[in-house]
Image (tube, coloured by chain):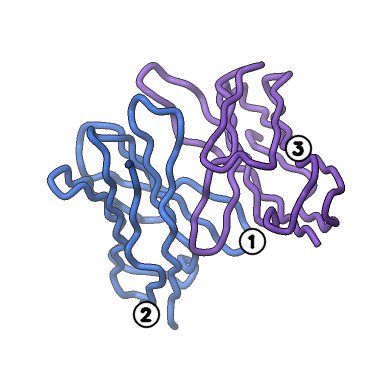
Amino acid sequence: AQSVTQPDIHITVSEGASLELRCNYSYGATPYLFWYVQSPGQGLQLLLKYFSGDTLVQGIKGFEAEFKRSQSSFNLRKPSVHWSDAAEYFCAVLPGSARQLTFGSGTQLTVLP
Amino acid sequence: EAQVTQNPRYLITVTGKKLTVTCSQNMNHEYMSWYRQDPGLGLRQIYYSMNVEVTDKGDVPEGYKVSRKEKRNFPLILESPSPNQTSLYFCASSTKQAQGFNEQFFGPGTRLTVL
């Protein structure tokens, strides 16, 4: 069965430190890949997406993600975290022929001053 | 401003009392969808609609109904709410493209409590 896994439920980093959030998926072919962020009490905002082409994609707020086909991964990174990045982050996958977006269970990010 | 709106934002109700959560988008999107978000489970799709008069079940459709009579609106109906439907609900919409779908735009969410 197709699935999306975010292995880290909660991550804590200090402000200014680097960040990597993990996402793995299991599908037969390369799907469309997304990262969303949800700030407290807010809806979801798209950070970045991968459809095809360059496997390193840039998003908003200084985030980037790298698609690695061999590892079925789409990890989100940021070189220097800001306190305003504290939020919950969701990886989502849309198989090319499918109509349903499947979300991971989310990673809660806490940023220490 | 392009957006997805949901109403109400907060709702407390009692078991068995029918309710409707409205969703409207002003982007002329073909695709619309409803999700529920529960701690530790991420977002799970309830129903989706490919276009007017075309709806289909998602992963957790039990206890919910939807309709798509107009392109911009996609209401979620709970005919007889139960406490296990207490959740945070999101509506989303997107365009449709030949190879799949573009990213989904989300509404602000509706927090529903069923007592």
In the picture of the structure, the residue carrying the numbered disc 3 is: B77
Using the image, name the chain to which the residue with label 2 belongs. A
Name the side, left or right, on which B56 lies relative to A77: right
- What residue lies at 71% left-to-right and 40% top-to-bottom? B5
Kind of residue indicated by mark 1: Gly
* Numbered circle sitting on residue A65: none
Tell me which numbered mark, 2 or 1, is placed earlier along the sequence: 2
Using the image, name the chain to which the residue with label 3 belongs. B
* Numbered circle sitting on residue A41: 1
Look at the picture and state if B30 lies above or below B106: above
Rounded to the nearest whole Å, what is the CA distance between mark 2 and mark 1? 23 Å
Kind of residue indicated by mark 3: Ile
Residue A112 is drawn in which quadrant? Answer: bottom left
Name the side, left or right, on which B1 lies relative to A57: right
In the picture of the structure, the residue carrying the numbered disc 2 is: A14
Rounded to the nearest whole Å, what is the CA distance between mark 3 and mark 2? 44 Å
Mark nearer the viewer, 2 or 1: 1
* Chain with blue colouring: A
- Give the class, few, some or many, for how many residues have Cα within 10 Å of label 1's Cα (few <14, many ≥20): few
| Frontmost residue, A95 versus A112 | A95
Provide the secondary structure element on which disc 1 rests. loop
